Amino acid sequence: KQEVTQIPAALSVPEGENLVLNCSFTDSAIYNLQWFRQDPGKGLTSLLLIQSSQREQTSGRLNASLDKSSGRSTLYIAASQPGDSATYLCAVIPYSGGGADGLTFGKGTHLIIQP
Amino acid sequence: DVKVTQSSRYLVKRTGEKVFLECVQDMDHENMFWYRQDPGLGLRLIYFSYDVKMKEKGDIPEGYSVSREKKERFSLILESASTNQTSMYLCASRLGGVVTEAFFGQGTRLTVV
């Protein structure tokens, strides 16, 4: 069964720093990988979707990479701001189920950006 | 803008009550999902649906049922609410196909007392 792990579980950095969040998955048979952010008590907001055939996707200060063969993805946040403080989750769509199945999630990285 | 709307942000129900959580999406998506999120356990899939009147069990379906009578609406039903169903419930939808983005609602915080 697919397992998704995110390291670290929590991270606190000063404002302005560049940082990397890590996501690993046990089964490389995935259609795509999606990164989300979640603010306290709220739903999930989609940040980036990487197709299995892609190596990376960029949106503003965010860059996500995917190495499917090694089962890893990273989310790079440039020039961090206090508004980036949130929990970041990664999720994969497995081959099984033809894509109709739900995403399999990691437990997230709780990020705090210190002003 | 894509929109997934859950009917309530907060609910408080008594043990044994029948509880309905409603989710509506306006994107004509085929696939809809219900998750629950608990500290230390992350998001776990309860049920999903890939078409009207179709449903599939996820990882933790016990104590829940679902209904999808119309494409845009997916309901989660707690037949007899119990305290261990106190949780954050999240609805999501995706277009059909394998490389499509999932969108989530704002979540319903359910407390069963």
Image (spheres, grey):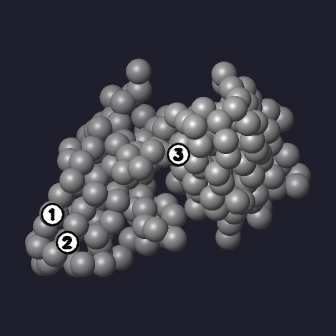
| x and y percentages locating residue B110 in the rendered image | 24, 62
Do the dots labelled 3 and 2 sit on one chain?
no
Residue at x-position 77% and y-position 64%: A26
Per the image, the residue denoted by label 1 is B12
For disc 3, the chain is A
Amino acid residing under circle 1? Val
Residue at x-position 16% and y-position 75%: B113
Mark 3 is surrounded, within 10 Å at the Cα level, by few (under 14), some (14 to 19) or many (20 or more) other residues, namely some
**Residue A86: mark in rendering:** 3
For disc 1, the chain is B
**Element carrying mark 2:** strand
Residue B107 or residue B62, whichever sits in front: B107
Do the dots labelled 2 and 1 sit on one chain?
yes
Amino acid residing under circle 3? Ala
Q: Is residue A43 above or below residue B13?
A: above
Distance, label 3 to label 1, CA atoms, is 26 Å
| x and y percentages locating residue B9 in the rendered image | 24, 48
Residue at x-position 29% and y-position 38%: B5
Amino acid residing under circle 2? Val
Q: Is residue B75 left or right of residue A15?
A: left
For disc 2, the chain is B
Give the number of marks. 3
**Residue B112: mark in rendering:** 2
Residue B83 or residue A70, whichever sits in front: B83
Q: Is residue A63 above or below residue A106?
A: above
**Element carrying mark 1:** strand
| x and y percentages locating residue A63 in the rendered image | 74, 32
**Residue B111: mark in rendering:** none
- Determine contact: label 2, label 1, CB under 8 Å: yes
Mark 1 is surrounded, within 10 Å at the Cα level, by few (under 14), some (14 to 19) or many (20 or more) other residues, namely few
Q: Look at the image and tell me in which quarter the N terminus of chain B lies.
A: top left
